[in-house]
Image (cartoon, rainbow, N blue to C red):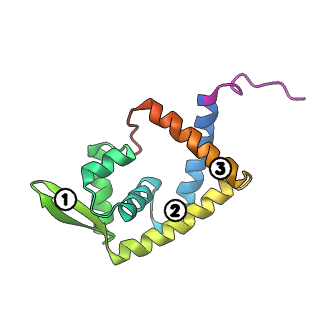
Amino acid sequence: MPAMHIFDGLLGYQIRRLSLVVMADLADALAPLSLRPAEASVLFAIEANSGLTQSELGRMLGIKRANMAPLIAGLESRAAITRDAVDGRSQALHLTEEGKALHARALAVTQAHEERCFGSLANGERLRLARELNQLWACRGESVDEG
């Protein structure tokens, strides 16, 4: 029986190790689409919440304003999103037809990635783990920049 590694019982360490592997796999999977995970997250969020503002999107994804602007500008330069004036400086974000197609490809890649990384878990186990991780995240109450 292998000796217990000193970090085996530390959840934060285990989550960080898993996060590094999972995010590297996702980055590799999205690379052929010329997307980074943060850009794919923006597409997913806009598709699910068409019309939200850049500020709302940043809060939702935990991305700082300074990092949000280049993400939006990059997707806009690819003709994936458009902005519509809401009031004053606020602009509503929408996917273009090209953005919807890119979203669909990114979603398929992400779903395949999820199966590759978490396919050994039964569906009920995945849902339970997601609920527990969301519960831990909600208790934290802080924004972490993914930009």
Give the residue displayed 42% in from the left and 53% down from the top: 38
Q: Residue furthest left?
A: 88
Which residue carries the number 2 mark? 30
Is residue 8 within the magenta segment?
yes
Q: Residue furthest top?
A: 6
Examine the image and state in which quarter residue 19 appears. top right
Identified by mark 3, the residue type is Arg
Nearer to the camera, 2 or 59: 59
Residue 20 in sight here = no
The x, y position of residue 145, in whole percent, is 38, 40
Mark 2 to mark 3: distance in Å? 22 Å
- Element carrying mark 1: strand
Q: Which residues are magenta?
A: 1-11
The mark found on residue 91 in the picture is: 1
The x, y position of residue 57, in whole percent, is 32, 52
Mark 3 to mark 1: distance in Å? 36 Å
Which label lies toward us, 2 or 3? Answer: 3
